[in-house]
């Protein structure tokens, strides 16, 4: 629709200032450290979840220098349960790069920000727009959905050609001559529109400031967009977890730096019951099955089958004894934390 480029930005800015979200703890700041931290935490994670992590993280690491100086274990411990742990590793590396390469100051343009570990084009644009007023558009999942509907883009949003088209359209819809904090309001407005009105299912079109210029709305089926023709099959796996306990300690291994739960601490993991039994050798009769757990990942469903054994570890089994109270302060996968919390709540056999 020809009217869209001229009305989109002014309407969005006015809507955000009037009815958009204003009470989130990372709003109202031009501190790139705080904006960056919130953007990384919010990737593929609901606001309600991040609200519990963001203030604790800032209390422990109030600035980029404090985060850069921290140990990887400290960072992973605070991130534990937030998921997508590669974000935490990149967060730590990025902080170290900002301190080592930029004197502790974040670069001021989206192009420069993208050279840092873990900062993609949309995150870089958010930091540059919020903190420095740069005229550059974000394009996260919410924004892709909004633009796909407003423009009725029929291409598969996972395809590179559609991604390029969306970036072009996103830039074309920016405020033509932003003043003051227009870029911050516009950028926040895009986020708010996708998060509160233009949702995946049951979009609230009648409350949307773009309802009369939205092509998907005019077509009568806004929920059809964005189009995703390629579906990724989910895998189902069973993992056997060996909870070795002794006195007030549990045996933990640090997971490899690649793959599921990378860099976190966990009990020994096996892909079959037979492999677990072989690892414990003649102590197999002491194994006690605990309640299974289900754990959902992006493209995988895990059934976790924990078995407890009170003994010294089998020969050749890597890892170390960690007191339970100390273990709960480490970076742990969410289901492992639940298991250890349950153990901590009851006396361990001597």
Image (spheres, rainbow, N blue to C red):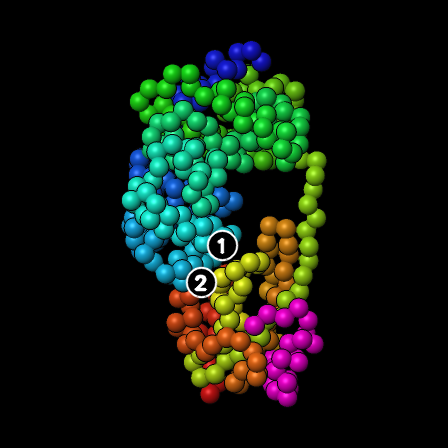
Which residue in the protein does label 1 denote? Answer: 85
Of the two numbered discs 1 and 2 on the same chain, state the one appearing first in sequence: 1
Which image quadrant: the N terminus?
top right
Residue 30, position as x, y percentages in the image = 31, 35
Label placed on residue 331: 2
Secondary structure character of the magenta stretch overall: helix
Q: Nearer the viewer, residue 292 or 143?
A: 143
The residue that appears at 50% across and 19% down in the rendered structure is: 172
Q: Residues within 10 Å of mark 1 (few under 14, many from 20)?
A: many
- On whether residue 276 falls in the magenta region, the answer is yes
Report the number of numbered marks. 2
Q: Residues within 10 Å of mark 2 (few under 14, many from 20)?
A: many
Q: Marks 1/2: CA distance?
A: 10 Å
- Residue 300 lies left or right of residue 75; in this view the side is right
Residue 53, position as x, y percentages in the image = 39, 52
Residue 173, position as x, y percentages in the image = 49, 20
Residue stretch in magenta: 268-288
The residue that appears at 36% across and 51% down in the rendered structure is: 96
- Residue 258 lies left or right of residue 21; in this view the side is right
Residue 272, position as x, y percentages in the image = 68, 71
Q: Quadrant of residue 293?
A: bottom right
Q: Secondary structure at mark 1?
A: loop
Seen in the picture, residue 336 relative to 60 is either above or below; the reply is below
Q: Are marks 1 and 2 in contact (CB under 8 Å)?
A: yes
Label placed on residue 200: none
């Amino acid at each position: 629709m020809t009217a869209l480029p001229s009305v989109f930005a002014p309407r969005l800015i006015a809507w955000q200032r009037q009815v958009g979200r204003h009470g989130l703890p990372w709003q109202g700041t031009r501190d790139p450290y705080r904006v960056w931290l919130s953007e990384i935490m919010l990737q593929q994670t609901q606001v309600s979840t991040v609200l519990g992590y963001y203030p604790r993280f800032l209390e422990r690491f109030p600035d980029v220098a404090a985060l850069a100086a921290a140990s990887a274990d400290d960072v992973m411990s605070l991130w534990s349960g937030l998921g997508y742990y590669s974000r935490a590793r990149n967060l730590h590396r990025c902080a170290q790069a900002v301190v080592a390469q930029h004197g502790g100051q974040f670069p001021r343009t989206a192009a420069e920000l993208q050279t840092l570990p873990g900062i993609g084009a949309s995150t870089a644009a958010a930091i540059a727009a919020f903190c420095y007023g740069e005229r550059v558009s974000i394009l996260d999942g919410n924004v892709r959905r909004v633009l796909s509907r407003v423009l009725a883009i029929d291409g598969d949003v996972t395809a590179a050609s559609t991604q390029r088209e969306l970036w072009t359209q996103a830039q074309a819809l920016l405020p033509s001559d932003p003043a003051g904090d227009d870029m911050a309001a516009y950028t926040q407005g895009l986020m708010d529109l996708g998060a509160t009105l233009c949702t995946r299912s049951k979009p609230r079109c009648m409350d949307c400031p773009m309802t009369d210029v939205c092509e998907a709305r005019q077509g009568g089926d806004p929920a059809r967009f964005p189009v995703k023709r390629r579906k990724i099959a989910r895998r189902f796996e069973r993992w056997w977890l060996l909870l070795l306990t002794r006195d007030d300690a549990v045996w933990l291994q640090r997971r490899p730096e690649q793959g599921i739960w990378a860099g976190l601490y966990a009990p020994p993991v096996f892909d079959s019951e037979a492999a677990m039994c072989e690892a414990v050798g003649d102590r197999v009769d002491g194994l006690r099955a605990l309640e299974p757990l289900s754990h959902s990942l992006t493209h995988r469903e895990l059934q976790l089958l924990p078995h407890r054994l009170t003994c010294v570890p089998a020969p050749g089994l890597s890892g170390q004894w960690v007191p339970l109270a100390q273990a709960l302060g480490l970076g742990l996968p969410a289901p492992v934390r639940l298991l250890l919390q349950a153990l901590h709540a009851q006396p361990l056999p001597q």
